[in-house]
Image: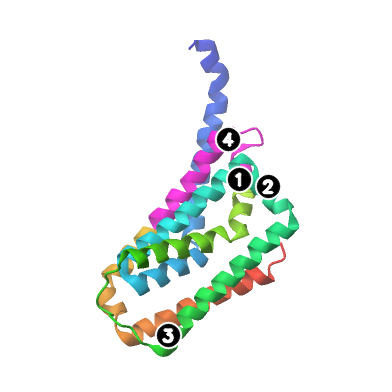
Amino acid sequence: MTTAWRGADSPRQAGRVSGYGSFVVFAAVLVLVPGADTAVVIRNTLAGGRRRGTWSALGITASNVVQGTAAAAGLAAVVLRVEPLFQTIRWLGIAYLVFLGIQSLRSAVRGDYADLAGGTVGGGAALRGFRQGFLSNITNPKVLAFYLAVLPQFLGPDAAVPVLVAFALTHAVLGLGWSLVMVAGLHRARRVLTRRPVRRALDALTACALLGFGARLALDRS
């Protein structure tokens, strides 16, 4: 590797480093803003304890990886440009959030919790947590729009696919980290959260959040 080549490439490398640092800060702030993913993680942690909450977070992360990779490969642009496909995904996401919201609301109304203090969960329940996290995220077209609209602002139009994927994976990892922090916090507060009145109140709040996110997605025409 020659010194001349290094000198010619260093401004570009410096720009990438600066852009990456800015993106990390932006993505971290974005991850901290509560959204549908937050509500799904909370719902699964309350329903099945730390393990199910963790698997829910892993499902969301897996979806972020899929969507980020699709955006880097150019597939996300196709989804957003084909209106029938975009609308189908959008309404599936709305329906799924409403479904989860109704489930939480029914749980709050019934207040019938078989084992409030147990905190253990079998493989089937863990898989259910993963599935709910993955489906709630993969059917949210705003995630695809985020990767397509935000990443170019930090990279430029000529960024290589591996660089795009690296940025997308960074966002996914940050999201996973924050979700696991939430799960750990909820687990540590289990003694309080597993009291029936508290659990019913949290289920009701989670239901309102999920239904609210579904309504917002339905009313958003962008």
Question: Toward the viewer: 93 or 173?
Answer: 93
Identity, as a three-letter code, of the amino acid under mark 1? Ala
Determine the residue located farthest toward the bottom in the rendered image: 110
Q: How many neighbours does mark 3 have within 10 angstroms: few (below 14), some (14-19), or many (20 or more)? A: many
Q: Secondary structure at mark 3?
A: helix
Q: Position of residue 165 (x, y in %)?
A: 53, 40
Residue at the location (48% across, 45% down)? Answer: 169
**Residue for point 56% across, 39% down:** 164
- Please identify the quarter of the rendering in which residue 115 is found: bottom left
Whether residue 164 appears in magenta in the rendering, the answer is: yes
Residue of label 3: 108
The residue beneath circle 1 is: 71
Callout 3, which amino acid? Ala
Contact flag, marks 2 and 1 (Cβ < 8 Å): yes
Q: Count up the numbered dots.
A: 4
Q: Secondary structure at mark 1?
A: helix
Q: Determine which of the numbered discs, if any, sits on residue 120 in the image.
A: none
Boundaries of the magenta span: 152-178
x and y, in percent, of residue 40 in the image: 46, 68
* Prevailing SS of the magenta stretch: helix
**Direction from residue 21 to residue 222 in the image, left or right:** right
- Whichever of callouts 2 and 4 sits on the residue coming sooner in the sequence is 2
**Residue behind mark 4:** 161
